Amino acid sequence: MKSSIFFYNTNSTRQVIIWMAQFQQDTLPIKYLGLPLITKKLSKHDCTPLIERILARANSWVSKSLSYAGRLQLIKSTMASMQVFWCSSFMLPVSVIKECEKTLRRFLCGGSGNAVKQSLVKWAKVCTPCQEGGFGVKNLTTWNTALLLKQVWNLLTDHSLWVQCKMYLIRKHSFWTLPIRGLHSWAWRQIMNLRSTTLMHLLYVIGRGNEFSLWYDPWLHGASIHALYGHGVIHDAGMVVTKRYRMPLFLISGVGLKRQGILGRSSKV
C-alpha cells in the first residue's frame, strides 16, 4: 500500500481512523516524489540526496572519458538540470547551491566531482550567457529564483492546483498585500518574499479584468492604488468596492445613465 496517514494530537480516535481509512500510519519527515516532505526550513541535510546524485553523475566512468568540451556539454544538458525539480519547489539554501556548484566546477576542470585542480576559467564566466562571451551554464541561484517565480505566476493566473492554495492561504485578500505571518509555512514565506522580484518582471495588458484588481494589483508604476493613496481614494471614487457598485457622489441632473451591472445584469441609474 502506497498511501500513508499522519496524525497530530488524535490519540483517542487514531485507531478508529486507521480502521476506516485502511491506511498505514507513518511519521514525518518522508519523501514524496523524491522531495523531502517537511514542515520546517529546508536544511543542507535534507538536500543530501540532490548533492549525492550530482556527485555520482560526475564520478561515473562515462563522465571521466569526456573531453573538456564534452564535460561542458554534459553540465549544460544534464547535470545542471538535475536540481530543476528541487528548485521548482524550494528556495535552496545557499550552502546547497555552493556545494552543487563546487561539484560542477571540479568536474569541468578535472573530470571528477572530487578532483581538485586549478580552474582555467572563473565560474562566473562559465555561468555568463554565450551572447556575452560566457559558456552558457545556468547560474543556480538565478535559476532557482526563476523557477519559483513560475509558481507565483501559476498562483496569480489560477491555472493549476495553486487555486486550492489560494483559497486557503489568501482567501479574499490580495496576494500583493497579504502580510507574512508566523503560522505560514517556510515554503510559503519564501514565495511571498518573491513579490518584489515579481513586480520587476510583471507587465499588465488590457483584458477582460476577471483576474485583475484595479485597486490592489500593482499596475501603477509597480505599486497599487491602495498602496499609494489608501482606502479613502477608493471610497471617494464612487466605483467598485469589493465587487459592489457604489453610487457616485454626484449625478448630473436630468441625465439618464445606463451601465452594465457588475453581476451581468443591465440596469439604469
Image: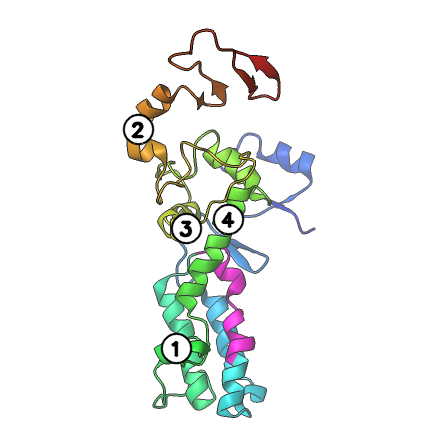
Name the residue carrying label 1: 102
Task: Reply above or below: 7 against 253.
Answer: below
Graded by Cα atoms within 10 Å as few (under 14), some (14 to 19) or many (20 or more), the crowding at tag 4 reads some
> Over which residues does the magenta segment extend?
75-90
Q: Earlier in the sequence, mark 3 or mark 4?
A: 4
Q: Which numbered circle lies on residue 198?
A: 3
User: Count of labels shown?
Assistant: 4
Which numbered disc, 1 or 3, marks the residue closer to the eye? 3
Graded by Cα atoms within 10 Å as few (under 14), some (14 to 19) or many (20 or more), the crowding at tag 3 reads some
Q: CA distance from mark 3 to mark 2?
A: 22 Å
Graded by Cα atoms within 10 Å as few (under 14), some (14 to 19) or many (20 or more), the crowding at tag 1 reads some
Which numbered disc, 1 or 4, marks the residue closer to the eye? 4
Which numbered disc, 3 or 2, marks the residue closer to the eye? 2
Name the residue carrying label 2: 230
Q: Report the side of 129 relative to 5 (left or right).
A: left
- Indicate whether residue 77 is drawn in magenta: yes
Name the residue carrying label 4: 153
Which corner quadrant of the image does residue 207 belong to? top right
Q: Earlier in the sequence, mark 3 or mark 2?
A: 3
Q: Earlier in the sequence, mark 4 or mark 2?
A: 4
Q: CA distance from mark 4 to mark 2?
A: 26 Å
